[in-house]
Every structure is written in C-alpha cells, then in structure tokens.
Amino acid sequence: GSSLFNAIFRDPNIKELYLRNLSKIQEHPHLGLRFKFCINPEYPALANLMNLPWEYLHDPIEKRDFLNLFETLPIVRFLDLKRPIGPIRVENLPLRILVMISSPAGYPALDVSEEKRLLREAFSTHSEIEVDFLKKATLLELKDRLTDRDYHIFHYIGHGGFEKQTGKGVLVLEDEEGNGIFVAGEKLKRVFRGSSIGIVFLNACETARMSAEKDPFASIVSSLMIENILAVVAMQYPISDKSAIVFSKKFYTALAKGKPIDQAVTQGRLAIDLSSFDTLEWGIPVLFLRSEDGVVFDIKDEEKRPFRQQRQSIKTTTEETEDQTSHRGIPQEELLTMLFCKNCGEKLLPEGKYCRKCGTQVNL
C-alpha cells in the first residue's frame, strides 16, 4: 500500500495538492476527497494498472493508515464514458435487492439455504431494505423477474472466472438442468437493459479483473457499466462468507439512509475491519463507478438525502448574503451571473446540455 502511495505522490506538486485538500477536509468536516482511478476507453493499455490493489493505498507519513478506511477519503475505479447519466429515482423505500445464488453441478457446492438465511438475518431488522431470491440461477429467470417488478440492486453469489485467451470475465450460472454455464459480460448486460437496476454486487472472485492484452472492456464490470449500470461492486480476491455478510449488511443499510455509494462501501470496509482483528479482507471489494458525485439513488424522502441538501444549502446561503465575498473561491459578482443545477446545486457550463455532476438535463 505504501509503495502504491509513493508511486502516485512522488511528484511534489501532486503531493502538495493532496496535503492541501487534507487541510480543507479538516476545516470543513462535511467535505471529502474522492480518489478516482479513471478507466479511459481511449487508453486501453492502461487497463493493466486497474489490476493493481489500489484499495490498499496507504499513507505512510500524514495519515499513517489506509486511506480507504477513512469515510472522507474513498477510492473508486471510475469508468470515463462521455455519456451523461444521473441517479435513479426511488419514490418510496424499501430498496429492493434481487439475489441470485448459483451453485451448479460440478463446481464447489454452496450452502444455498445457509446463504439465504444469513442474508435474511442480516436485513431482518431493516425495514428500508427488502430482499428477494431467484428460484433458479438462470438468465431467463433473472430477466423475467426484472420484467415483472422493479428492483434497485442485483446481488450475485457464486463462482466467477477470467478467460485469459479472450480477456473476458465470466460468471458461472446454471442451465435448466442445473449444470454450470459460462456467461460473459456481453450477454449478461442484455438482461439488465431497460431495467431499474442501479447497482450490481458480484460476490465472486476475479470479477474485478480486466485484461490489458485483450479488450479491457470485455470484463464483466465494464460490460455492465457500458449498459448504464451506475455502480458495480466486485471482488479482486476470494472473500470469506463472514466478511461478505458483514460488508453487505453495513453497505446496504448505509445506501438506504441516502449515503453516496463510496461512503457506503467505506462503512462496509470498516465493519469488516472492526469485526475481526486478523484480516485485510476489507480491501477485497472494489467499487466501480459512473456517478460523478457517488449518488446512485435519488431517494424521494428528504431526510434520506443529506448530501444533496448540503450542496443546495451552500448555493442558497451565497445568494441570500449580500456581503458574502466568495463561493468555492468565486467572487460574489461573478457568482450572481452563474447558473446552478436545480438537482444538485453544481455550477453549470454555459454551453452544457446536462449537469456534469448528476446528469440532470439543463433547461435554459
């Protein structure tokens, strides 16, 4: 972790920028510093860097800890597609999770009953979360359920793999007879086309892996995000059942309370870290993101939207106070001529058709 940190911050200018932002966070507790490792389709050769364990980035001098264990310093992998995409509107809680447990013949058996029991138990006291299970781990069953009802999150438990010859990531699903079949991302993404799914959670090893030699966008994660899935949580190494359940419980509860997904992931990491004193499994989940501000679900209940309220209140305060001299370093006279997104309060570009932060269409 320290080696990765030193590789990034060896340039004194970059390090100075990092330290300056840490000072701002100290002065303004409601702010945070998001580290976005951008996956740019224009530079496929850089995909090899995405296979490094950036989640263990460790500051050996200033923080003397892993950055990913600070809620204000999340690390995400960001898919840099030039297509605006905003949060998914959720009129009413609960958040609905659709779970697929795949345990086909010929593969290490999963205790399906126990997996279901653990997930039900984890969310039994949380009325803001509802969990449904697929009867069969087939693509047709998944498509039918997504067609019949709106779900917000798809949670997969099973086996994953990576084909070196093709560079494709695969999930091991079941056919109608219960035998295992490889399903690549290019086919899986078609199931979610037109659905209300905003987050895909892949509890299977090697699902976070990409290929630099082949097509880096043939991975499971890339395929899903190209299909407008806003966020994918995948695993870069195998994770124990205990840690997976602890992480999931805290992660989903934070989401239902309106937390941005990167902060929800951090809370899940902390839960793993604090529940066991001899594991580094908190760094196994990898968050891939397309949302600029980390907000995947726009929950109607205002009490569930604390971070959007903060951005809006900054704007209101600036407009109401005549002697206010600046807003994010902007002179007051210049601020009065600016336009702001009605959804998230972000400054709008004069020629822009969409808010660059949340994707809301601009009506000038």
Image (cartoon, rainbow, N blue to C red):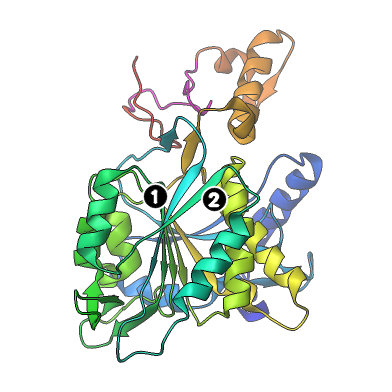
Taking the spot 65% from the left edge, 24% from the top edge, the residue there is 314
Residue 261: which disc?
2
Amino acid found under the numbered disc labelled 1: Leu
Q: Say if mark 1 contacts mark 2, CB within 8 Å.
A: no
Q: In which quarter of the image is residue 79?
A: bottom left
Q: Residues within 10 Å of mark 1 (few under 14, many from 20)?
A: many
Compute the Cα span from label 1 to label 2. Answer: 10 Å
| Callout 1 secondary element | loop
Taking the spot 51% from the left edge, 40% from the top edge, the residue there is 94
Along the horizontal axis of the image, is 207 left or right of 147? Answer: right
User: Closer to the camera, 18 or 32?
Assistant: 32
| Callout 2 secondary element | helix
Name the residue carrying label 1.
230
Taking the spot 45% from the left edge, 29% from the top edge, the residue there is 91
As for residue 140 lying within the magenta part, the answer is: no
Residue 277 rendering spot, x and y as whole percentages: 78, 79
* Quadrant that contains the N terminus: bottom right
Q: Quadrant of residue 165?
A: bottom left
User: Closer to the camera, 91 or 313?
Assistant: 91
The tag earlier along the polypeptide, 1 or 2, is: 1
User: Closer to the camera, 53 or 150?
Assistant: 150
Q: What stretch is highlighted in magenta?
A: 338-352
